Image: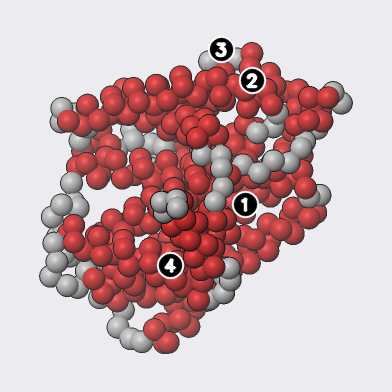
Amino acid sequence: MNTVYKEAQKTQRLYYFDWLRTLAFMFVVLIHCVEMFHDLYQARNAPGLQSDALAAFLPALAQWCMALYFLLAGASTWFALKRKSPAEFVRERFSRLFMPLALGFVLLFPLQAYVTMVSNNSYQGSLFAFYPYFLSEILLRGKLYLIILYIHHLWFLAYLFGFSLLTLPLCLLLRSARGWAWTARLGNFPGGLLTLAFPLLLTRLTLLPAFPEYCSLADASCWLLIYMYGYVLFANSTIQQMLRQQGRQALALSVLCSGTLLTLWCMGLLRGELLIPRYTLNSTLYQATQCIALWSSLIALLMLGSTHMNRTCPLLKYSSSASFHWYLLHFPIVVISAYYILRLPLPAWCAFSLIGASSFLATFLLTDLMALHRQGLRQVYSSLSSFQLAISPSE
């Protein structure tokens, strides 16, 4: 085993991972706030939130956020397997992902379904009576489609848990000296890391027209690839050097593809049927542009993060410890906030702002009050104190 490979095994904290997770979480919450105008009170028309722009770009933004989550999860798996044995890793996955998923399935899943069904007059009754009714519909009567309808954000835990176990043999193989040598050959590919967009593109073009629903086989296959890409990107110093060198190229390509999509929308060409995945030339070109924009933006974001965001502060320590609990708790809070706010005669932009602000605030406070992150408020106070000292004029 050569010296470079041994050096690659050293553990180093990448603080920009925590910044990127926090960024992705904020976007996810805002996306879910917009989706409340479709999920709750479906008969109500919300001017300003029912536009072609949202139809075109909101799904793309959701895809980007979840791709970033899976990319960072794959990279975190690389670092976790350097510290843990395979058995320890599997046990950690059970405690970290499966147990919260099981708890969320029993406690949060029916709550989300109750608020949605009550707001749309699909159920009348108390929350206390709804829990056994809803779970019995799934477990005893086999209405599994209810899981797809109402599981919402908890699907991410299920997918990530499955990906972690499914790819473990391949991950262990790539940790070996032979696997390290194989990943180092990425530098010999024309286009380098940007070449990895083509398997994603082929998967998307092949499966998406047949499985167009969100979180379907097409999405799952792409996210699985991105999860493994995240694992490979941090496998050795050679790839990290490529990441820094090709980051600017990826940024330019991302801006070009995103600008092309924006231009098509402004020209009125990005409408209706084009947004529906089909085995047609126009749809293929649209999906290809969107896929290349997604992958190149992820490469560019990692480059920018490693260059400008790889530093810590007390607030980041708080968010890095609490981000998982934020994700777990935020959606029921968004649903409950929207349940009360959307009943008020407010303009759409005002309702959206109130839902977003109340959801963020309640998520942060509830995370601390439930002792899911006991040092949270202390870290925030410390961060604010440090900020106050930093901006105070010197004597």
Dot 3 or dot 4: first in sequence order is 3
Per the model, the C-alpha gap separating discs 3 and 4 is 46 Å
- Report the disc number at residue 64: none
Q: Count residues near mark 1 (Cα–Cα under 10 Å), then give few for <14, some for 14-19, many for 20+.
A: some
Question: Tag 3, which secondary structure?
Answer: loop
The location of residue 383, given as percent across then percent down, is: 50, 58
Q: Which residue is mark 3?
A: 190
Question: Tag 1, which secondary structure?
Answer: helix
Residue 17 sits in quarter: top right
Amino acid type for the residue under numbered disc 2: Leu
Per the model, the C-alpha gap separating discs 3 and 2 is 9 Å
Q: Count residues near mark 3 (Cα–Cα under 10 Å), then give few for <14, some for 14-19, many for 20+.
A: few
Label total for image: 4
Amino acid type for the residue under numbered disc 3: Pro
- Report the disc number at residue 363: 4
Q: Which residue is mark 2?
A: 186
Amino acid type for the residue under numbered disc 4: Thr
